[in-house]
Image (tube, helix red, strand yellow):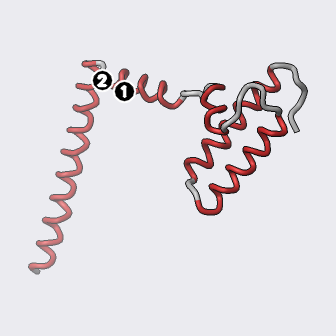
Amino acid sequence: MAGKILANLIVMGSAILGRAFIQAYRQALANASKSGVAQETLQNTIRRGSKVMTEQEARQILGVTEETSWEEILKKYDTLFERNSKNGSFYIQSKVHRAKECLEAVHQGKGEGTPT
């Protein structure tokens, strides 16, 4: 008998707390939209997510100059990528890959043919 009463109290308490949480969340959203916090947060998230690597940053990551040939860029890329895949950082490995993609787009944009 006591177990049944205790179970009912737990279920009813959970339902009450759940409704209160949902109501508080809705009120917080309403307050945020009134003060403009929601739009500002969304805009900051979009700006951060769309940051594109510059050509200068890509060249620094790979350690190449503007005069470096495409073949040498690929050799640098392969070396850095492999070195970081074995005992390095996935973050650095992804930066190296993005740098190669950036320089590849620049290379193609200059009309120097398709990189191999």
Identified at 11% across, 72% down, the residue is 5
Which disc is residue 37 wearing?
Answer: 2
1 to the left or right of 63: left
Amino acid found under the numbered disc labelled 1:
Thr
- Quarter occupied by the C terminus: top right
Question: Is 19 placed left or right of 102 in the picture?
Answer: left
Q: Amino acid at mark 2?
A: Val
* Quarter of the image where the N terminus is located: bottom left
Q: Residue at x 55, y 54 (%)?
A: 89
Q: Nearer the viewer, residue 47 or 12?
A: 47
Quarter of the rendering containing residue 55: top right
* Circle number at residue 41: 1
> Dot 2 surroundings within 10 Å: few (below 14), some, or many (20 or more)?
few
Residue 84 rendering spot, x and y as whole percentages:
62, 55
Q: Are marks 1 and 2 in contact (CB under 8 Å)?
A: yes
Is 108 situated above or below 26? above
Instruction: Point out residue 97 in the picture as x, y percentages from the top left corner.
Output: 68, 43
Give SS at disc 2. helix
User: Badge 1: few (under 14), some or many (20 or more) residues near its Cα, within 10 Å?
Assistant: few
Q: Position of residue 51 (x, y in %)?
A: 54, 27
